[in-house]
Structure formats: structure tokens, C-alpha cells
Amino acid sequence: MVTDSHSRVDSRLIAELREIAGADGVTSHASELKVYECDGWTIEKTAPDLLVRPRSTAEVSAILKLLHQRKLAFVPRGAGTGLSGGCLPLGAPVMICTSRMNRVLAVDLANRRIEVESGVVNLHVTNAVKAQGYFYAPDPSSQVACTIGGNIAENSGGPHTLKYGVTTNHVLGLEIVTAEGEILEVGGWTQDTP
């Protein structure tokens, strides 16, 4: 664990992260970071020293490789609508926000599957398939703002989950990036056999 995070976030790190995520993908100004100091439960507040907003899995991988090399802790964040403090940067100087990873990548209605990036808003999953009579069952009260990555991290639910199950009942596979920056795929398009 990093004990003196402020001395580790320097102009060189910021420049290197901007090379990866673009100038508009890295924020270090205290006034801009204030928005990220809490989640939906505003009692606890801790702003990160640095915010990085990647656009792709490849960028997340490059960012995490750099942070791992520098031995810097990080915390991921979706929309920050949770109530558990899961995205608060306690002891982590860098926050990685997935809000720009917001694309629906594939829709396979015949097999009732959809592939999305982690920053896709929950309700947008339903909107992508509702014209064909489908919906995404995990529907927390924050579904107009919360993201799929956050839903997976928190195993979100909602009224429909009483009948159809929580988030983990609807995820077949994940593309994940380890803390060292390695990209892994777990699961896939095929449902588990009973």
C-alpha cells in the first residue's frame, strides 16, 4: 500500500497518463476532482489526487501497467451512484473512471445476449433492446445513471430482480484488466450447463 500518495503523483506521471488517455482524459485540478469525492452516500468524502478516464480496455491496461510500475494504488469508478463507498479513493491517489467506455458493442437477440463496455449506463442496455420486446432485469433505482461496471462490482439489483435475479445472474463473461495491466477474458457467450 502506498503511504505517501501525494509525493508519487507528479507532473511526469500526469504527462505519461495524458499520452495514454489524452489531455481531456486526465484531471488533477482540485476543483474538478471535487465531483469525485463521494458516491451516492455523501457522508464520506475523499477526493482522489488524480482522475483518469480511459476510452478503451487497451488504455486501461496501459494505465494500470504504469501505475503498477510506480507502485501507485488506484480505485475504479463507474458513475459513482452506489451507496457503499466502493469507489472512494481511500489510500488510493488515482481514480480510474470508466464513463467514456460507454459503447454497446454487440446485440445478439436470437441468443438473448448483449456485449457492452463497463461505462454503459444500465438503462441504455434496456433501450438497446426494448424495441424488440426485451429488457435488462437488474434495475436499481439509479438505473438512469449507474453503469454496468458498477452494477457488476456491487452486484446490483432492483424490483425486477425478485423474479429475474441480480446482476451476476445476467453476466456470461467479462473482459477484465488485472492490477498489473494484464487483459483477461473470463466466461463468454455460452451459458453454463446445469
Image: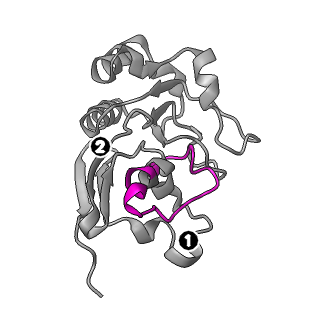
Residue 139 highlighted magenta (yes or no): yes
| Part of the protein shown in magenta | 127-149
Residue 185 x, y percent position in the rendering: 23, 57
Q: Which mark is residue 180?
A: 2
Q: Is residue 91 left or right of residue 12?
A: right
Residue 162 x, y percent position in the rendering: 59, 76
Q: How many residues crowd mark 1 within 10 Å: few (<14), some (14–19), many (20+)?
A: some
Image quadrant in which you'd find residue 120: top left
82, 191: nearer the viewer: 191
Disc 2, SS: loop
Q: How many residues crowd mark 2 within 10 Å: few (<14), some (14–19), many (20+)?
A: some
Disc 1, SS: helix
Q: In the figure, 132 relative to 50: above or below?
A: below
Q: Nearer the viewer, mark 1 or mark 2?
A: 1
Residue drawn 70% across the image and 35% down it: 45
Q: Quadrant of the C terminus?
A: bottom left
Most frequent secondary structure within the magenta stretch = loop
Residue drawn 58% across the image and 41% down it: 80
> Reading the chain from its start, which is encountered first: label 1 or label 2?
1
Residue type indicated by callout 2: Glu
> Whole-Å distance between the Cαs marked 1 and 2?
34 Å
The answer to whether residue 173 is visible is no
16, 53: nearer the viewer: 53
Q: Which residue is mark 1?
A: 161
